[in-house]
Image (cartoon, helix red, strand yellow):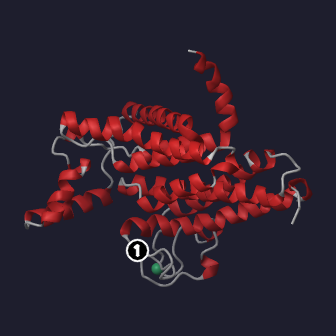
Amino acid sequence: MDLRLDELPVWFLRIFAAWFGLIWGSFLNVVIYRVPRGLSVVRPASACPGCKTPIRAWDNVPVLSYVILRGRARCCGAPMSPRYPAVELLGGLLSVAILEAIVLRMPGSTFATRAAAVYLADFALTMGLLAAAFIDVEHMILPDSITLSGIVLGVTTATLRGLTTKASIVGAVVGFLIVWLPFTFLYKLLLKRTGMGLGDAKLLALAGAWFGWPGAVFVLFAGAIQGSVWALLLFAFGVKAKIPESVQAELDELRALAEQGDEEAKRELAEDPLAEDDAAARPRLPFGPFLILACLELLLAGPWIERFVAPLSAF
Ligand SMILES: [Zn+2]
């Protein structure tokens, strides 16, 4: 069991990482569809969204099946969303990126078991964040099942990243507070409405658990800058950000229930910033994907970012 990193053939590691990422990317498509709808990710097996025919294994090969079938289901010709191969491809690319940017930069004398633990932890984080980003784009929600388990994984694997468990816990608390305090608590206190969702606060707690409190601060600022650039681009090209269809449908359903006197629906509407009457106060861009992008940047380019940010700390 004392195999070392430099005893493993690099070509094998690269092929394995690409294959592993593609396979899990395929599973993420199931997660992205089912988790926000409250469905099990394990059962039933994948079926065609058009005609419910079970999808055969050889029509479910990541990326390749989509290309061979030219984006249409074999059973009924229903168009398949390009999101499916895109998520699979991203899974493969991010997996290889973790191998190249993190694992293969560890000293060659590192035990293979330790290198594998680092790879698996970072891979689990990356896949969770990838799913969360796509779910947030479609539903404007960051599922607790992803953010909370990400925090737990971050704390339990902290020492793999040279972080103490204490620093990881402090990071999680600071990460939560830098969003919750100004954007949720004070906003509500002063303006009597909800500013940013708790989901974003939990995502920042995750960033703190993985990268310590300076990492959480970086993710918040880098996420805000990237989100602003995107909003400016949309504005410059005259694209109006709209609430996603699925979110609109969920809101319509809640409003119908509330009109019938459903107390639970009324309470949910009152707490949901998306249901705000004042259109100008309604958030239209999910912030999660920009925070997640910043998390991945920090994970994959951490040492480079530190060198870039270090001179700023002199001020
Ligand atoms: Zn079909």
Q: Is residue 279 left or right of residue 111?
A: left
Residue 43 in the image, given as x and y percentages of width and height: 48, 81
Depth check: give the residue in front, 75 or 59. Answer: 59
The residue at the point 48 percent across, 80 percent down is 47
User: Of 194 and 29, which appears nearest the observer?
Assistant: 194
Amino acid type, mark 1? Leu
The number of numbered badges drawn on the structure is 1
| Residue in the image at 54% along x and 65% along y | 28
Q: Is residue 119 visible?
A: yes
Q: In this orientation, which residue lies closer to the viewer: 16 or 311? A: 311
Q: Secondary structure at mark 1?
A: loop
Q: Quadrant of residue 153?
A: bottom right
Query: Residue shown at 58%/42% (left/top)?
Result: 167
Q: Quadrant of the C terminus?
A: top right
Residue with the most extreme right position: 7
- Residue 276: image location, x then y, percent: 19, 46
Residue 44 in the image: above or below residue 70: below
Q: Left of 200 or right of it: where is 218?
A: right
Q: Circle 1 is placed at which residue position?
A: 39
